[in-house]
């Protein structure tokens, strides 16, 4: 304490004698406190000129994500509706991940179930047929709009554009339909905190949190926040899982990027600014190019121009004998450029033509550079983003392989979070109604899991050189690195078991045809 007091007195004396010297000592002390070690010399430095102007204010998931979601969703969907690069990126991911829909292929664990291989294959075929009875029709949709595979496309597209999508699993009876399970998709905006629960700390943006941080329920409004309907605004609390059955009532499709995050972020969020600026630049270049392609003649007359009886068309308004010139707006009298237009000017008026110099030679290079950055953030190689493969075979193949890492990851996520839970709920109903026989399904969780095993197959990877791909697949099978079933799925998206049965039938038919041809006397012998 004595040393601190002496130091303070010394500082006061120095400040009184030389305020500038005292200020320099204070700045030096501050810098000494800031510049310590480690990251303070690099990314955490406040003294480097390159980082001195970097103002960052981090927050929790609420401040960083939840408070900004409404704006992010609106801007993301606006880009999807109006920016070609954004639309192409989202649709490219949707088409490669989901395509026409992920198809069910049951894969039960027949060893646990003590079944033979033939019995297991027969059970799987039976389950696949029954599932198609439910999934191939719009009756599986609560709104009767889409079949199950189209629901996958819609749910995934909504997830990409809005950052998340919700699916309810109500039970709705319908005539002449053997299954009552339905799927109802809910747009992300409708899940929100009720006005009477704003001060409830356990409800985060419409998601109710339990004691251990688990999701307990969702609050779903009967209206869309951006809609114009005038109905009474109400919220319905829907538990995530049933209290007695434990079945999922709500499926929440979102991709978390931080722990304790409760709501999803649109995939375009990191590149919204770049996409918007690029769209504005493209529109400006397009407008300039259109203007530069117009040829308009301006005539300067020494006399005053009679705008009402002018023989030339300097406006876009079409006049006829019944035109009331007093009702013509000033906007209709505007002089506008046109294709081959002839415009007459007033006395003393002159025109200065500004040549926009389009098309801009640097336009393509700039767009390419920005598109590469956007593609990198979205895990889409530039070639796939703009559908332009002008590089070598090796470079193009490397781009496809890199993109397919992301496609497979998202396909696995979609099958785990959307397709598989719905399939398990459907299978439970099918077994409960006796349409599928599964002893022990409701008694042993391990047996239940064995019956619920399944694969979800989607569109195959594109092939730049089919012959090379087939030869590589054949070598993988010959060396035991893969199976015919998997390679068939990867190359064609088909089912090897179905193909081999069809081939057996075809070979049998070809043998019969060859035998007939061999037994027929030749035309030459008949002639002789």
Image (cartoon, helix red, strand yellow):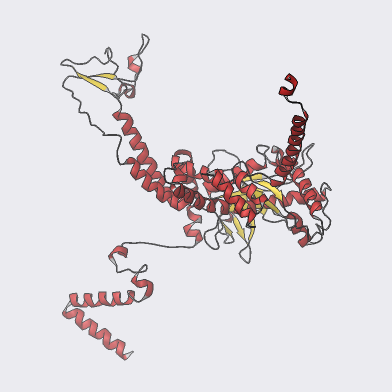
Quadrant assignment, res 212: bottom right
Q: Residue at x 84, y 48 (%)?
A: 434
Residue 217 visible somewhere in the drawing: yes
Q: Name which quarter of the figure residue 357 lies in.
A: top left
Quadrant position of the C terminus in the picture: top right
Is 133 on the left or on the right of 150, as rendered?
right
Q: Quadrant of the N terminus?
A: bottom left
Closer to us: 464 or 514: 514
- At horizontal 63% and vertical 57% (from top left) the residue drawn is 479
Residue 442, compared with residue 470, is above or below; it is below
Residue lying furthest front: 528
Q: Residue lying at the far bottom in this picture: please name it.
A: 2
Residue 349 image position (x, y, % from top left): 18, 23
Q: Report the front residue among 384 and 80.
A: 384
Q: Residue furthest top?
A: 321
From the top left corner, tell me how far across and down residue 93 is, in percent.
53, 46
Can residue 192 be seen here? The reply is no
Compared with 242, 360 (above or below) is: above
Tell me what residue is drawn at x 34 percent, y 20 percent. Answer: 316
Report the side of 523 relative to 6 (left or right).
right
Determine whether 54 is above or below 157 in the image: below
The residue at the point 18 percent across, 24 percent down is 350
x, y percent for residue 501: 74, 43
């Amino acid at each position: 304490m004595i040393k601190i007091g002496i130091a303070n007195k010394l500082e006061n004396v120095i400040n009184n004698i030389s305020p500038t010297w005292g200020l320099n000592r204070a700045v030096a002390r501050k810098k000494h406190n800031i510049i310590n070690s480690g990251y303070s010399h690099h990314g955490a430095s406040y003294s480097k000129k390159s980082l001195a102007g970097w103002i960052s204010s981090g927050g929790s998931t609420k401040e960083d994500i939840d408070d900004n979601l409404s704006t992010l969703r609106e801007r993301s969907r606006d880009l999807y509706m109006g920016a070609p690069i954004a639309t192409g990126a989202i649709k490219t991911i949707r088409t490669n991940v989901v395509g026409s829909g992920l198809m069910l292929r049951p894969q039960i664990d027949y060893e646990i179930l003590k079944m033979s291989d033939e019995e297991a294959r027969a059970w799987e075929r039976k389950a696949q047929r029954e599932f198609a009875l439910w999934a191939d029709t719009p009756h599986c949709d609560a709104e009767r709009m889409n079949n199950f595979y189209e629901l996958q496309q819609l749910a995934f597209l909504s997830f990409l554009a809005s950052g998340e999508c919700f699916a309810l699993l109500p039970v709705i009876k319908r005539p002449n339909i053997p299954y009552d399970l339905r799927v109802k998709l809910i747009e992300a905006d409708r899940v929100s905190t009720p006005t009477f629960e704003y001060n409830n700390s356990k409800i985060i943006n419409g998601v109710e949190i339990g004691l251990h941080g688990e999701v307990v329920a969702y609050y779903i409004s009967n209206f869309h926040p951006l809609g114009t309907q005038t109905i009474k605004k109400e919220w319905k609390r829907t538990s995530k899982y049933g209290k007695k059955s434990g079945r999922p009532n709500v499926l929440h499709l979102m991709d978390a990027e931080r722990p304790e995050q409760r709501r999803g972020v649109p995939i375009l969020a990191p590149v919204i600014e770049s996409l918007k600026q690029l769209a504005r630049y493209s529109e400006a270049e397009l407008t300039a190019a259109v203007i530069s392609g117009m040829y308009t003649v301006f005539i300067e007359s020494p006399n005053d121009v009679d705008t009402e009886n002018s023989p030339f068309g300097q406006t876009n308004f079409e006049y006829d004998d019944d035109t009331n010139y007093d009702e013509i707006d000033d906007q209709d009298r505007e002089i506008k450029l046109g294709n081959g237009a002839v415009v007459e000017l007033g006395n003393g008026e002159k025109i200065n033509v500004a040549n926009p110099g389009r098309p801009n030679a640097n336009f393509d290079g700039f767009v390419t550079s920005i598109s590469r950055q956007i593609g990198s953030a979205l895990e889409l190689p530039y070639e796939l983003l703009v559908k332009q493969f002008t590089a070598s075979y090796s470079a193009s193949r490397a781009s496809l392989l890199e993109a397919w890492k992301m496609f497979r990851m998202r396909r696995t996520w979609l099958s785990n979070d959307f397709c598989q839970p719905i399939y398990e709920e459907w299978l439970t109903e099918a077994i409960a109604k006796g349409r599928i026989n599964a002893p022990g399904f409701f008694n042993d969780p391990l047996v239940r899991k064995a019956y619920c095993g399944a694969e979800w197959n989607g569109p195959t990877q594109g092939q730049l050189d089919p012959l090379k791909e087939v030869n590589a697949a054949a070598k993988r099978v010959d060396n035991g690195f893969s199976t015919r079933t998997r390679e068939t799925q990867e190359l064609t998206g088909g089912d090897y078991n179905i193909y081999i049965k069809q081939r057996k039938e075809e070979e049998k038919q070809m043998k019969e045809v060859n035998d007939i041809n061999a037994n027929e006397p030749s035309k030459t012998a008949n002639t002789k």
